[in-house]
Amino acid sequence: MTNPINPFNRPATSPVNNNSSKAPSKDSADVGNSGASNAAQDTVSLSRGSQQVIELQQRLNNTPEIDSVKVEAIKQEIAKGNYPLDPEKIAENMISLEQSLIE
């Protein structure tokens, strides 16, 4: 008796795709059709929501991770001394981040 789960005890089987149902090539499909077009073609349509998701993914892929223009502007403001830094707010945000990492 063979175990159907164990592939080592199974007899050799033929492959699932043996190319017997291979679609005819374009040249052989046109022979005898005398110019007739294919009767049906498969189509796919996406919902508006899925189209929006694809558009957003494309925008994200094209957007740089770092806004170098903004970084350069902040650097210039810091160099001029015009960029206000609140040490207490920075500390609070760091503590908040650490707490969120612990949870």
Image (cartoon, rainbow, N blue to C red):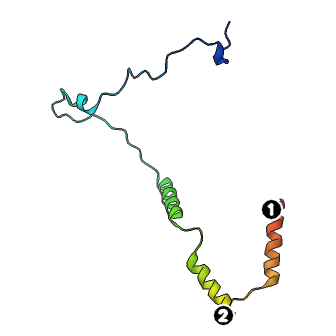
Count the labels in the image. 2
- Residue assigned mark 1: 101
- Residue nearest the viewer, comparing 72 with 93: 72
- Residue nearest the viewer, comparing 51 with 88: 88
Which image quadrant for residue 70? bottom right
Q: Foreground mark, 2 or 1?
A: 2
Quadrant containing the N terminus in the rendered view = top right
- Measuring from the top left, give residue 46's x and y in whole percent: 45, 49
Residue at the spot x=18%, y=26% of the render? 32
Q: Going by the image, does 37 lie left or right of 13?
A: left
- Measuring from the top left, give residue 88's x and y in whole percent: 82, 82
Q: Going by the image, does 68 lie left or right of 80?
A: left
For label 1, the SS is helix
Residue at the spot x=65%, y=16% of the render? 8
Which residue reaches farthest top? 1
Quadrant containing the C terminus in the rendered view = bottom right
